[in-house]
Amino acid sequence: MKPLDILTAPGIGLPAANVDTDQLIPARFMKEPRSVGYGQFLLFDVRRDAQGELDADFALNKPGAERAEVLVSRRNFGAGSSREAAVYALVDGGFRCVIAPSFGDIFASNAVNNGLLPAVVEEDDAERLLAVLADVQDIKIDLVEQRLRVAEVEVGFSINPVWRTKLLNGWDDIDMTRQHQGEIDAFATRYAERFPWARAPGAELIGKG
Amino acid sequence: MSTPTTLFDKVWRAHEVHRSESGQSLLWVDRHFVHEGSFHAFNKLAERELPVARPALTFGIADHYVPTRSRSLEQVDDAKVRSMIEQLSDNTQRHGVTLFGLDDPRQGIVHVMGPEQGLTLPGLIMVCGDSHTATHGAFGSIAFGIGASEVAHVLATQTLWQTRPKVMRITLEGRLDPGVTAKDIALTWIARLGADGARGYAIEYAGEAIRALSMEARLTLCNLSIEGGGRCGMIAPDQTTFDYLKDRPYSPRGEAFIEACAYWSTLSSDPGATFDLEIVIDAAEIVPTVTWGVSPEEALPIDRCVPVPDESDDRAKARQIRDSLDYMGLTPGQKLTDIAIDRVFIGSCTNARIEDLRAAAAVLSGRKSRVPGIVSPGSTQVKRQAEAEGLDRIFVEAGLEWRHSGCSMCVGMNGDMVPKGERCASTTNRNFKGRQGPGARTHLMSPAMVAAAAVEGRLSDVRALVATSPSSGDTP
Ligand code: SF4
């Protein structure tokens, strides 16, 4: 994963609360392999009108929005389903950071696992950012200092410190965990002795379905 | 004994393999469920040429994409849907993982079938690439949904890195009124605290009204924890739990069961244990509740009116209400019981267990549904049980379709969808925009309330209908 420390890139506002993962990528696209590029499915239904045409007023359909790498939105962004495809849609669509007053837990952790920064700002600050980002504008995000700036608006943001470290270094969990293999094996042995009933006794008795 | 400890911390600590300097815990995972959507994770594993570390602790379930009209893969028209089901079979077979496939008599929605088979036990850590994994916490386990990268991590290591969440307790004092269900408890607290009200927290449900709930109802309540943003939901195991688990196929047996029960009995929050947040709700205040908007927090008691955006003094709130009403095609101030529906859906991991089907059938018995609808049992075993009790005939005679088990119209992945612009009274868990199909409008409520809506052709209060029941005496 590519490390992320300071990013200066075009940003766009999506002024809506509860942008859930069903909106970010409708379920019907999730049977596609990742190789088709999930960016084309990002907010697929929400950005279209009843006739299925792109809605020119929708934030992400505005001129220049296709260049955006940073998205600012309202509270509870990414709530709902655990589908990592919602993050794939953003990442494949060119986004490297989403800024909102709160995120769905699973979405945020999926984001970090794909190098996408979920930056938490105060509700008022999100509104100030949205006001200047009615049109696409460059936004500077400093993950080291945890501050971001667009035009004359400068605000701090927060992020789980572990996630911050992971993003700064571009670390991958599986590599990290495999350093603890000895500990895991020792734990598994102790655990099996202490909780012998926990090992799914039927597993060997019943054939494969 | 040392300092008083919460149920959550007892289970968490028993699973800590390692704690990093930054405070993250590496947790041992007891049960891992994979479904058709887990193909991304298997692909990641293949890319890195890694084996599944502990195949005996992973279980594959075909549920998200399975057809509900038949159990035959050949009859699935959409080649891509068919390939999703086939990929799960291939991946589980390749890695020696037990599969509960499409035509397995034990097949069901993962969160219905896991408990039913005794795979879900108290005191475990359980994960699945599905946010409603919180369901399994009804037994006093820590169970939560994870994304594809984490699924790959669990497959490769049988562990997961997690930051310990804060812990909150929702206590329901007193008793629920008749006709009020676990679904109403959930919609009520989520409406009060917001769809992100429990974000960052593990939830423990406690109190007299919770203790009185059946295992099925507890599963419904914990299932909806995620809709309030909770990381997981838990209920301390008790005699109800032990009785449910006895003699399930994967439950421990004989001596092992007795030994397990002794340990499980210690799994409750000690008196004096502290919580980061305490919420107390008077159970008697809860009434049958329905959603009117596009987030589960947009829920109201059935005897109320749709909100009027301009009456909200908070601008952001007013904007959100306006946007939701617009999508839902509702008029501000309109009575909830004046909202006409186009179809009903009874199904999903939230409300398709045998008790749910009994509650819906009790209302529909001897009546007709004014709208079309589907009933999809939560598992193949629930389907068999319902048929043995004659519930299928009640649904069919009322004019509804009796289908096979699967996620079906909860998420529409298998093609069962609510047509654009249509309004569905649904026992599911998400009323998000487009959840049940592009342009679909969803109202969430309990199974008995969906049955009442079917009979009346509009949202309605099941308590009024039960009072005049043709099959008198059958209160849901
Ligand atoms: S029934 Fe719905 S919520 Fe439950 S597992 Fe299936 S898709 Fe998810």
Image (cartoon, coloured by chain):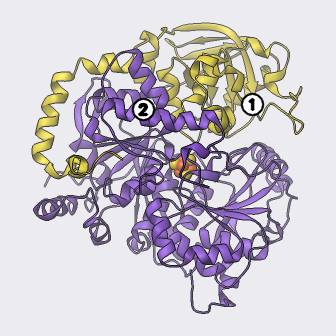
Chain colours: A yellow, B purple
Classify mark 1: helix, strand or loop. Answer: loop
For disc 2, the marked residue is B90
Relative height, residue A190 to residue B142 (above, below) = above
**Residue displayed at 69% across by 30% down:** A73
Image position of B173 (left or right of B326):
left
Image position of B45 (left or right of B239):
right
For disc 1, the marked residue is A44
Tell which of A2 and B382 is nearer to you: B382
Classify mark 2: helix, strand or loop. Answer: helix
Spatial CA span between label 2 and label 1: 31 Å
Residue B285 visible in the picture: no
Question: Which of the 4 quarters of the picture holds residue A155?
Answer: top right
Tell which of A148 and A203 is nearer to you: A203
Relative height, residue B181 to residue A60 (above, below) = below
Tell which of B428 and B264 is nearer to you: B428
Quadrant of the image containing the N terminus of chain B: bottom left
